[in-house]
Image (cartoon, rainbow, N blue to C red):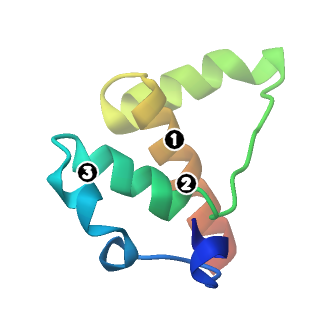
Amino acid sequence: MSEWLGKREIKKEDLSEWLKDIKFFGSIARWFTEINLPHIVVVVPNEYIDDLVKKVEQEYGTLSAGTLKKAALDALIEWIKK
């Protein structure tokens, strides 16, 4: 969609008006606004999985796709700031 609009990134305000009438606007808008952002896929070696699960549960209370994504993003941001 951002290519069609001629932009590298788009904001919710850039989306079509008809999208705002959809019940699940939040998730659709998030998809359109995040699709062109960098995505990172990390394959975790077996020897680190148990430690990763323990650390995520310790920091975020439970292990889920959301908490794992948050943990990875927090670690990446911390690494970038160093």
Please name the amino acid that badge 3 sits on.
Answer: Gly
> Considering depth in this image, is 67 or 1 the residue closer to the camera?
1
The residue labelled by disc 3 is: 26
Please name the amino acid that badge 1 sits on.
Answer: Lys
Mark 1 in CB contact with mark 2 (< 8 angstroms): yes
Work out whether mark 3 precedes mark 2 in sequence or the reverse, and give the earlier one. Answer: 3
Badge 2 crowding class, 10 Å Cα cut-off, few under 14, some 14 to 19, many 20 or more, is: few
Image coordinates for residue 29, horizontal then vertical, percent: 35, 56
Image coordinates for residue 61, horizontal then vertical, percent: 30, 28
> Considering depth in this image, is 52 or 70 the residue closer to the camera?
70
Badge 1 crowding class, 10 Å Cα cut-off, few under 14, some 14 to 19, many 20 or more, is: few
The residue labelled by disc 2 is: 73
Q: CA distance from mark 1 to mark 2?
A: 6 Å
Task: Give me the residue at 30% from left, 78% from top.
Answer: 13
Task: Give me the residue at 64% from left, 63% from top.
Answer: 36
- Disc number placed over residue 69 in the picture, else none: 1
